[in-house]
Image (spheres, grey):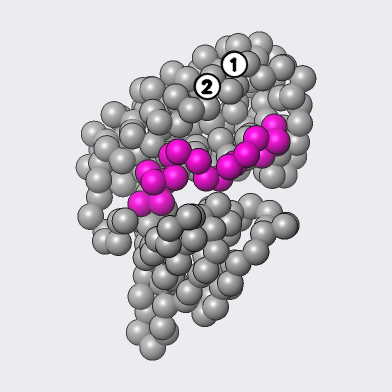
Amino acid sequence: MCTDDKRDPWLPDRLLRTERDLLMPLLRRTPEEAYELRTACPGWTARQVLAHCGAALVRIVEDRLEEGVFLPEANAGDVAEREDWPLGRILDELERGLTEAGPVIAAREDDRLDAVALGEWVHAGDVREAFGEPDAYCGAALDLALPLLSVTSRKRETPALVGVLKEGTTTRVSLGNETAGRPPATYKGDAATLIRIYAGRPLVRTRYELTGATEQELLIYR
């Protein structure tokens, strides 16, 4: 498990490609009416979440990263631009982005865009949850998402936390930044709930123990 600040430039690419192979078959076979279901993202349907995801990734691919590009206003503009697109075109753009954005992110000398890959994976969970699919914020790509969460939590200056995850076997993760005079917070629960906490997703019907920090302090997307 990733516990230091050393960047693996190809980790976002591996996560995006793995998610592509897991998510796209589900999206292609899902009836179109399901895309109008609401997600955990306020005001956005599954279709709009996926439109945002594809737009963000293709912006990276095409190097259209003007100032403020990923702020809420810009995201809303990208979604509005795609309101009249056929669903197939939205899915095609998303698949292109999941395939081509990773190498562009890896080629950068900084890690500014690494968290975008993690956000795409979280949004895939938002759509899975809307569709009633199991393991919305977990699943086969979790082993790639958790190390990226570890690095992102440090970059976003969240407090230090030691997580004890119970997923059949017990796994420990180290997140956030140590602060003088403040011991690390502790989390005990499943990995999907930990992702929900850091991504600011609803915690209804979850069960976990969190001591030494509040959920608000742990948010990486604000």
| Front-most of residues 74 and 125 | 125
Using the rendered view, name the quadrant where residue 128 is placed.
top right
Report the span colored magenta.
129-147
| Amino acid type of the residue that numbered disc 2 sits on in the rendered structure | Met
- Residue 122 percent location from the top left of the image: 53, 43
Residue in view at x 45 percent, y 66 percent: 164
Report the Cα–Cα distance between label 1 and label 2: 6 Å
Residue in view at x 68 percent, y 54 percent: 202
Residue in view at x 51 percent, y 18 percent: 93
Number of on-image labels: 2
Using the rendered view, name the quadrant where residue 44 is placed.
top right
Residue identified by numbered label 1: 28
Residue identified by numbered label 2: 24
**Residue 146 on the magenta segment:** yes
Q: Judge from the rendering whether residue 202 lies leftward or rightward of residue 19; answer left or right.
A: right
Q: From where the camera sits, is residue 198 visible?
A: no
| Amino acid type of the residue that numbered disc 1 sits on in the rendered structure | Arg
